[in-house]
Amino acid sequence: MADTPLDTATPSAAGEAKTVAPDQTDTTTATTGTTGAYRGKAVLYRMVFPGHICPFGLKSKDLLEHEGYEVEDHHLTDRAATDAFKAEHDVKTTPLTFIDGTKVGGYDDLRRFFGKKVQDKDAPSYTPVIAIFAMAFFIALAMTIDTERAVFVGRLIERFFAVAMALLAVQKLQNIETFSTMFLNYDVLARKHVRYAYLYPFLEALAAVLMIAGILTWISAPIALVIGGVGAWSVYQAVYVEKRSLKCACVGAGTNVPLGPVSLAENLIMVGMGLWMPLRMYVFGL
């Protein structure tokens, strides 16, 4: 785990942890930071088991070296040694860093010590949505250049929306059970027909793939119109009428994207694609 409670206690000696367990094998190495000016010495204790190396320990070591510290790197090589070390220093997790004899804490504490941002796991975040739409744009751009040998804005936008739908569907398909639970919080159709919550990601994926391929528009367009229209109305009702604060199911489980503009935009995109695709093919002949 990443964190230990922030403490200002000072150990009696830098190598104090070596005696916490009689059978402990402590491998100690010293490395010097390669970036920035030399700032001093840091003592790091981290788990390095035969089958497991603590990732937060590696991050702590890298951060210390990046900040210009010489790192005295102590390896806690088994569970007994680690538990004894935590008990002695009254911490719940490792790694643990000391800088100039002062206990700093775990990886998150170390980031705070250097004035760096620490992610709040419960804070709302639009990062997953930004990543998905950015990748959708570049994939669509690559597809357009490859097939058209030029960038036609209309085709680029069309492919961008279709690829975005596909990527959003993948997010939902990773954990359908959790998605369906989140979806049932606000979708009006799913509340009447629960099975629709399980079917939704597959319908979105099918419509997206058919739109990307430019085939079977008579199937993809109605699907997009129905699920997009119902979804847009559901989001509008939940967020803007009922004023409810919910997490968006649009990017699947495990995210803190607020329900609102993002989900509304996703659904309006599907409605737009559902209207545009048949018009382009059957009316404009494009």
Image (cartoon, rainbow, N blue to C red):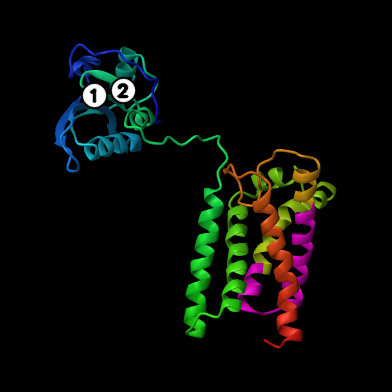
Which quadrant of the rendered structure holds the N terminus? top left
- Residue 99 is marked as 1
Give, as a three-letter code, the residue at label 2: Val
Residue 284: x and y in percent read: 72, 86
Residue 65: x and y in percent read: 22, 38
Using a 10 Å C-alpha cutoff, classify the residue at mark 1 as few (fewer than 14 neighbours), some (14 to 19) or many (20 or more): many
State the residue at coordinates (72%, 47%): 183
Give, as a three-letter code, the residue at label 1: Ile
List the residue tagged with mark 2: 104
- Asked whether residue 194 is in view, the answer is no
97 relative position to 262: left or right: left
Q: Which residues are magenta?
A: 208-233
State the residue at coordinates (62%, 67%): 161
111 relative position to 276: left or right: left
Residue 196: x and y in percent read: 77, 54
Using a 10 Å C-alpha cutoff, classify the residue at mark 2 as few (fewer than 14 neighbours), some (14 to 19) or many (20 or more): many
- Residue 279 is marked as none
